[in-house]
Image (cartoon, coloured by chain):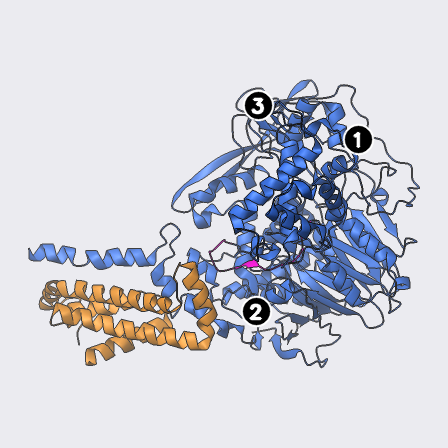
Chain colours: A blue, B orange
Amino acid sequence: MKWLKLLLAPAFPCALFFFLNFKHGDLPPLGKLLNPFAGFWQNNAAGDAMLSDQQLPELQESVAVVWDDRRVPHIFAQNAHDLYFVQGYLTARDRLWQMEFQTHAAAGRLAEIVGARALEHDRFRRRIGMTYAAENALKAMQADGKSRVVVEAYTQGVNAWIRNLDAKELPFEYKVLDYQPEPWTPIKCALLLKQMAWTLSGRSSDRIMSLTRSALGEELMQRLYPQYPPSQDPIMPATTQWNFQPHVAQKPEREFHSSPSGATKSIERISTDGSNNWAVAGSKTASGFPMLCNDPHLGLTLPSIWYEAQLVSPEVNVYGVTLPGTPAVIIGFNQAMAWGVTNAGSDVLDWYEIKFKDEQQSEYFYDGAWRPTQQRIEELKVRGAATVRDTVTYTHHGPVAYRKHERPFDEQVPAGAAMRWTGHDASQEMLTFLKLNRARNYEDYVEALSHFDCPAQNFVFADTAGDIAIWHNGKFPLRWREQGKYLSDGSDPAYDWQGWIPRAQVPHVKNPERGFVSSANQNAADLNYPYYLGWDYAAFERGARINEFLATKSQLTPQDMMNLQNDVLSLFAQKTLPHLLNLLPPENLEAEQKQLREVLATWNYEYRAGLAAPLIFNTWWRELFVLIWSDDMKVGEHELEYPRRDVTMNMILCEPASPFYDLKSTAAKETLADLVQLAFQNAQEKLVAAHGPFGPKWNWEMARGTDLPHLARFPNVGRMHLPTSGNSDNVNAITQTHGPSWRMIVSLGPEVKAWGIYPGGQSGNPGSRFFDNAVDDWVAGKYYELLYLKTASDKDARIVGKTSLRGGR
Amino acid sequence: MTAIMACFVLMLALQLITPFWWWIMVVPFVYGVWKSRSVWESARVGMISAGALWFAMVMWQWLSGGQQLAERVSKMLGMSSVALMFVLTVAVAVLAAGMAGVGGYFLKPFGRIIENRGGGGVRS
């Protein structure tokens, strides 16, 4: 009995130790996490204290860091190495977990942290060649002396911070997820850039469009999915002259038609991403100097996507937002110029159907012969389980993401097809940013852009000399019209990309007569532009609204620019709603329906947070949209691609007798008016079911709201249901999940002045007061004047301290 | 009281110089094997010393700007009040240390064997 006690006595404490010391499913290791000496309690706001003066052996000379009251570091270094070393060091101080987690996600390594549930996510990342793409980018970076120095210095800086990190200072998320940071390596910088490239250029509808064409036929495809949709107001003014001899891509005589297998679900064309940028010439501003504005819209999370910084050395003095994990400023300004980006949206990803000799996929048919494939072995480590080995087949097009019989993780990906993506090619995007940071004029800007391939972006530019410009910039394949809109034939060389659009011939414009340039993800140019770039761009509304505003105003001030970035007028509602109301006579409506109709009839088309009309209109439109298309866009198990909102709007306005209004499920022949009335009734029922009878709860902010979830989706650590105004078709294109990730306004001149804000804060620590300190101001549409210093000894009331970093030991 | 104070000070020192939380189990466990006179006394020494230590430290962290994070973590863990965050933290310390103390007490015969053989035991 005594010996039994001796054996059992430690069993209970051991079991408790096991429970408290290790992670169990989603439950963090409570002993470690709650330990007030090294657990989460240590990540409190005391960490917001100023960084103390210190020695860092890797520094070649001393570096001064000036801190402003929003925790923005203004780094004054005496050479490039030290500048980027300290950028890496300070970014890691504030965002280490975020930058490392994002590289794990990009590289398909999340299962190492969270276990088997991320395995398919990781497999997908490996299958689409994210690491392969980053390796190619890294080779190019290392081949360029300047880029190599910068990336290596940044890497050293991150590692210096990791090296000095003790257990209690470990970021909160490592404690919850129970793992440790690993040394930073240059490829992680490349991975982050590739992750952004995939986010912005990885969307593809080739598979569903092939199915849709099979079902609808060519003529309807041209009508319903046009290259140049109605009401477009393109980025390049219609008067732009294309004075060059274009290269021509030869279209094959035999047209390839594919009908891929597997069920599909329509990617409904209600845009979630939408960015804006514009530059106004001095002739239209009150200051007489150009102004430049940019608000890139992305999926929003906390910690924030961006990290603000000023980087100063003898050759550069640049301010803007950086991407945590990569050197340089991505969007910003210096004394001489400013630049900003929106996503180009041109098609740089095609899928090729591949015919393999056998299941081994060791040979594929191409140009009349069997060619060998290359096999890349991917090792997927899984926390708490055995490592999984995965073989990815590469053809000359690129990787084959999924075999014929496999179900893709991402439904847009066609099984049995190889992807050709410009993101896989060796490229020098970071060099572009390094050069833009140092650019003095239009020529420097154009030279910098020549290194930027993927993701293609609309780079807007303005300088103190008075020039403004915009380039729809990137490495664009030379295609025949609509090449790549559908699945391509991977065995026919005629379907390969036949070269590139020469960089000098990509759409661009400098100092147009109208006195401004702008972009909002819409078509780059009208059909007079001789090259085919793609078909799936943002609808007209945001671009047209920006152009309408800028064209009609003069003596523009920064406040006007702020108003425009926060503009919530919907041109879509302005065009569509009166027509819909005409088809909804009040005499046929019940009392509450009359009330709703009246709310809409008196609406000023603005998506303001407290209004009921945006909620009613959006619900009504959605019901109508689904009624029009859901019966026509389904063939067997396949859901076809729904036509876009702007195409649907045009049909409603211009085709009163379209056959698509008839509901196939009924014997009667419905008209547009029937559908409009039915949709209104359905919308009312849905809204009553969701919010009760018409009343104060029916308002845009309560029904929609915007979420800033934590990046790892920890519940209740982010900021949820923010009372935002705006909608995806407004200039202030906010949705529940996406929105302006950075709003910036730069007024150039002898003394450059700038304003900016992003939804979050400089710190990635949920315990810091700088984690989300800007969120409420961002919701309210406020801005902070950015502190642009010339020297480390400049005086300003917003400066709260200085840190001196010295080299040597 | 002396035992509680001694364990408190020892755990404090060990927790300050190392990152390991489990000193609040090891110290009461060793006390239980070595010095405890009853199972209740062994549990009590561990529970009070570890509970007091973690409570004091949590208070310190709270007053040092820990409110916002404590609120976030309490919500993340599905708690209705941040006060429960205190309760949970102290409860973990009390439970872990108390159970370790009890486990140690039941190993006393093993401790005596070692002591009698004069090998490896901790001596005062």
Q: Could you say where residue A525 lies in the image, as x and y percent from the top left?
A: 83, 42
Local crowd size for mark 3, using a 10 Å CA cut-off: few (<14), some (14–19), many (≥20)? few
Q: Quadrant of residue A204?
A: top right
Local crowd size for mark 1, using a 10 Å CA cut-off: few (<14), some (14–19), many (≥20)? some
Left or right: residue A442 compared with residue A327: right
Q: Could you say where residue A181 lies in the image, as x and y percent from the top left?
A: 49, 58
> Which chain letter matches label 3?
A
Kind of element beneath mark 3: loop
Above or below, A621 against A65 in this view is above
Above or below, A595 against A267 in this view is below
Q: Which residue is mark 2?
A: A770
**Amino acid type of the residue that numbered disc 1 sits on in the rendered structure:** Arg
Front residue (pair A113, B94): B94
Question: Are marks 2 and 1 in one subunit?
Answer: yes
Principal secondary structure, stretch drawn in magenta: loop
Residue at the (11%, 70%) spot, across then down: B38
Q: Could you say where residue B53 lies in the image, as x and y percent from the top left?
A: 31, 74
Q: How many marks?
A: 3
Above or below, A544 against B73 in this view is above
Label 3 or label 1, whichever lies nearer to me, is 3
Q: Quadrant of residue A646?
A: top right
- Tell me if label 2 and label 1 are in contact, CB under 8 Å: no
Q: Which residue is mark 1?
A: A481
Residue at the (85%, 69%) spot, across then down: A749
Q: Which residues are magenta?
A: A712-728
**Amino acid type of the residue that numbered disc 3 sits on in the rendered structure:** Gly
Left or right: residue A527 compared with residue A424: right
Q: Real-space Cα distance between discs 2 and 1?
A: 50 Å
